[in-house]
Image (spheres, rainbow, N blue to C red):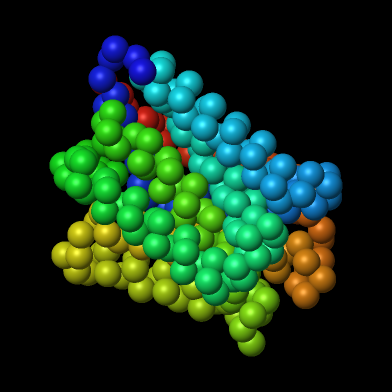
Amino acid sequence: MSSKKLNIHIPTIGIHYWMLMILATTIGEIVGNLISRNLGLGYSTGSILLIGTYLFAIIAIALSGKESPTVYWLLIVLGNIAGTNCADFITIEPLKLGTIWGSVLVMGILTLTLVAWKFVSPKSTVETGLNSKTFFLYWFAILVSSTFGTTSGDLLSNDTPLGAGGGSILLLVILAIFVLLNKYTKVSKEILYWLALVIMHPIGATIGNYISKPAGLNFGNIWTSVVLVLLFLLIFIAGKRTTEVKYS
């Protein structure tokens, strides 16, 4: 760890942030499937490779003591891709827990992670910034919430009458409720951030399923990945001035 104490703020949370987040979660779903299925790496090898890359990037940032908008969003995308493979590892093979029990397990891990955050550093929030104690917890929570997004998104898409389209609509309605709560109530912004993030991930999963799979638009994983990455880059570049990451 760098001798310089970590004190890193995530990008400004607003419309631009959430647009990039939902694109990142959708990219994670599609590219994760592309790596494990189209490239034939499988869920185990894909999970090990992607989690290893994700951890290496996080440690490199921690050692440098600095972060930038580009690096932040690269980690978000990597976390979402890794989370997709972890979800398939848990629900399909080799653990074969299924989408219901897989979702319960992952949500339990996420809850414990956030409780641990408040226990080790109660004054550190997504608004005040990440310190040396919460930096790794934040990125672990991102990975776990992404994993939950795929398990719960697949649950809605494949194991309920809603399907990918109906599941996306339901989740968007729930997300809109959180937005209204944030605007018109005094509910903790920290709580609403994590609730929105938890909902955002399965939205990305259901949208990704709808775009890429035969039950939806059937564009396939490869072309969907290309289009989504280009769209993400365009929105990121267009709003780069509003996503400044501050560190001291």
Asked whether residue 210 is in view, the answer is yes
Q: Is residue 74 left or right of residue 92?
A: left
Q: Quadrant of residue 79?
A: top right
| Extreme residue in the bottom direction | 161
Q: Residue at (35%, 41%) from the top-left corner? A: 137
Q: Quadrant of the N terminus?
A: top left
- Residue 81 vs 153, above or below: the answer is above
| Extreme residue in the top direction | 3
Across and down, in percent, residue 139 comes to 42, 40
| Extreme residue in the front direction | 95
Q: Is residue 207 left or right of residue 203?
A: right
Q: Quadrant of the C terminus?
A: top left
Q: Which of 102 and 192 lies nearest the eye of the viewer?
A: 102
Across and down, in percent, residue 135 comes to 34, 34
Q: Residue at (39%, 62%) from the top-left corner? A: 108
Q: Quadrant of residue 229?
A: top right
Across and down, in percent, residue 16 comes to 45, 48
Across and down, in percent, residue 214 comes to 82, 71
Q: Which of 239 and 87 lies nearest the eye of the viewer?
A: 87
Asked whether residue 16 is in view, the answer is no
- Residue 74 vs 80, above or below: the answer is above
Count of residue discs: 0
Q: Is residue 196 left or right of residue 27?
A: left
Q: Residue at (34%, 66%) from the top-left corner? A: 179
Q: Residue at (37%, 42%) from the top-left corner? A: 138
